Amino acid sequence: MNDAKTELGHKILAIKQAKQLTWAQIAATLGYSPTWACAACLGQMSMTPETAEKAAGLFGLDAAETGLLQAIPYRGSLPGAVPTDPLIYRFYELVMVYGTTWKELIQEEFGDGIMSAIDFDVSLERQPDQKGDRVKLTMTGKFLPYKRY
């Protein structure tokens, strides 16, 4: 279902590399955060017509591709099996190891509910450390309590 958007994402990655662009530069052009810009270019978000036109200009996309950037995606870019890419696997591993802990701590603090992945922000920073730089991810999501009826 996401094949065309996935293929377009691969094309955008190739153009990004050829033009030696960074996600920060792309985000500045599109007017969004690097995280959102990357997700949208890889097919996991839908762009407004104005944003899609900016992306089309930056990447030299045709009208069909510009339209595809605006299409609502079938989200979830990973296959159902355990991911094999080492970096993506580590996120999977984090959820396997800490998922029940995060669930318990969030629900102790907020009650019975979930952290939204729709009303959600994430940022990534390099954190200098004498033992080797660290990756700092900050995630914030709106708490959504389960309805009782």
Image (cartoon, rainbow, N blue to C red):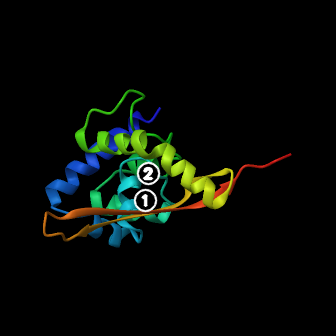
Circles 2 and 1: CB atoms closer than 8 Å:
yes
Work out whether 79 lies above or below 10.
above
* Residue 117 visible somewhere in the drawing: no
Question: Residue 129 in the image: x percent, y percent?
Answer: 18, 69
Front residue of 79/57: it is 79
Horizontal and vertical percent for residue 91? 35, 45
Quarter of the figure that contains the C terminus: top right
The mark found on residue 52 in the picture is 1
The residue depicted at 35 percent of the width and 50 percent of the height is 62
Measure how far apart labels 2 and 1 are at the Cα level: 6 Å
Which quadrant of the view contains residue 4? Answer: top left
Residue 136: name its quadrant: bottom left
Label 1 crowd (10 A; few <14 / some 14-19 / many >=20): many
The crowd level at tag 2 (other Cα within 10 Å; few <14, some 14-19, many 20+) is many
Does residue 90 sit above or below 46 in this rendering? Answer: above
> For the residue marked with disc 1, what is the amino acid?
Ala
Which residue is at a point 41% across and 47% down the rendered structure image? 43
On the image, the x and y values in percent for residue 57 come to 32, 63
**Tally of numbered discs:** 2
- Which residue in the protein does label 2 denote? 69
Sequence-wise, the earlier of marks 2 and 1 is 1
Residue 145: numbered disc: none
Helix, strand or loop at label 2? It is helix
